[in-house]
Structure formats: C-alpha cells, structure tokens
Amino acid sequence: MSADLAQFLDGLFRSFGLIAYAVALGGIAFAAIVLRPWRAPQAAPISAVSSCLRLAALGAAGISVCILLQLAAKAQFIAAGMNIAPFPEFFRTQVFQVNIARAALAALTVLAVLWLGRRPAAVARWLALGIVAAFLVLAGAWLTHGSARLEQRGMLMALTTLHQTAGVAWVGGVAHLVFLWRLGGRDAPAANFWPEALARFSILGIGAFALLLAAGIPLAWIYVASWSGLAGSAYGSVLVAKWTLMAAALALAVANFRAARRWRQARAASAPRGEEPGGSRPIFKAGG
C-alpha cells in the first residue's frame, strides 16, 4: 500500500468514526432527554427506546472498528512514507495509546447500552452508561489540536472537547430524530409520540447550541485572533463556512421550536374537552 493511499484511508476512517461517534453520543443524549424511559407517565414507546439504543450501540461499535482501522492505516503510512518499521515504537506514541483507550471505552459503551436496553427504566444503568460515555468523551481531549500546544494547553483541550461534544450531540440527536420519524411510518405508538418528541428535542438542541457557542467563541478568538484572520487563513475560512451553516440550522430550529410550542399550547387547551389538539403542528410529520 502506498503512503498516499494509507493517508487517504486514515482520513476516511476518521470521518466514518466521527459519524459513528455522533450516532452513539447523540443517541444516548436523545434517549435521555427526549425519550425519558425512566419516567413512566412521560416515557416514549418501548419501540422508540429500543430502536434508539440499538442505533447507539451500533454507533459505539463503529467507533471501535474505525479507530482500529485508522491505527492500521497510520502504521502503514509510517512504513510506506518513511520506509521504516512502525513497530514497536508506534505502540509508545500518545496517538496509539489514546486511540486504543478510546476503542476499549467505545466497546465498553456498547456493552453498557445493551445492558441498559434490557431495563431502560433502571436509573442505575443510566448512571453507569453516563460514566462510561463521559470517559469516552474525556479520552478524546488528548487527540485535539490543543493537546499539542505549549500555551493554554489545558484550556484549549477542555474547550475543544466541549465544542465537539455539543456538535456531535446535536448532529447525532437530529439523526435519531429522523430515525424516529422513519419508525413512525410503520409503528403507531412511535407516530403518536412524534410531535412530543419534536417538542422535547428543543431542550437538547438549545442546550447543545448554547454549549457550542460558549466553547466555540473563545476557541475562534484564540486561533484566529483578529477579524482579518477570518479571510486570511484556512482556519478562518472554515469558521465562516461553519457559521453560515450554523445560522441556517438555527433558523430551522427556531421555526420548528415555535411550531412545537404552538402544538403543545393547542393540546393543553383542548385536553379538558377531550378533543384532539388543533392548531399548528411541528414542521415534520410522522408517518411519511
């Protein structure tokens, strides 16, 4: 394998790993904030909870697989690009050790999610999953750009980890929202729960967006340092593109939040009369 191909595969596996990370972490957040299986009166249908946890477990398994494939590609890149044997020196690098720890934590997350799936209402199992997922998130801090800096290293690692966590929770939560919508097309309880899920998702979306901004603004200032840097650096150009996409996503989120709030108000107003709630429905509809 050539060095160019190994480098390409390294980036490809990293991209797939980020998708899997979003599906896993976003699924855990979605199940906890939106589905709430431990709160019997407000809990989502068991079909929705089971589907979400299965996808989260699949995402966590994908993290482990992608990390191992990425490490193999890195080792091949070293061998082909530098014409040296990567082992055993590669075993002693921070990249290898942190990634192996993350792969092990991701595998442990799979087990924790599957264990939770047997009794999704058990609060103790949720706490166990939360602890494992927190260690998985924290382990990633040693792979950020900030970990390689001499100045403000700890702060940059913390801010980048918070920024990434908020991003994957938001994106992964949206993915699970779409999966729930698809499930509603063939499952009546999930279809009935859909408007409520969309209203509850506002909590996850607003929280993730606030954390995204709170961590992203100081990061942007530290790395860019000036308004001219936005146009004069590659990182600045990426920031402008991210802000544009974020503004579009925020506009859609605000419109959907207002529609969900109107739906809840209409349901509350019609509940005493025993009628179906009227008024505006959220933008998306279950069942197609």
Image (spheres, rainbow, N blue to C red):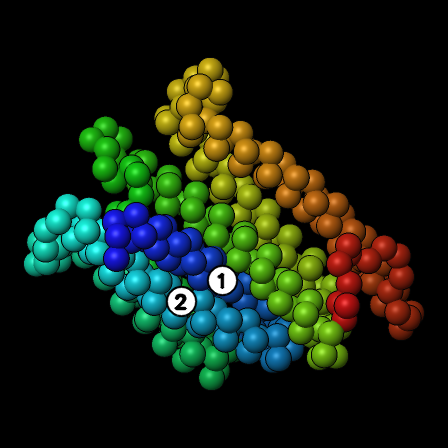
The disc placed on residue 271 is none
* Residue at x 49%, y 41% (from the top left corner): 212
- Left or right of 51: which side holds 87? left
Q: Is residue 53 above or below residue 206?
A: below
Q: Which residue is mark 1?
A: 23
Residue 194 picture location, percent across and down: 71, 67
Q: Is residue 86 above or below residue 144?
A: below
Q: In whole angstroms, how far apart are the C-alphas of marks 1 and 2?
A: 9 Å
All told, the count of numbered labels is: 2
Residue 267 picture location, percent across and down: 83, 63
| Residue located farthest toward the front when viewing the structure as drawn | 2
| Residue located farthest toward the left when viewing the structure as drawn | 88
Judged from the image, the secondary structure of the residue bearing numbered disc 2 is helix
Label 1 close to label 2 by CB (< 8 Å): yes
**Amino acid on which disc 1 is placed:** Val
**Amino acid on which disc 2 is placed:** Gly
Q: Which residue is mark 2?
A: 62
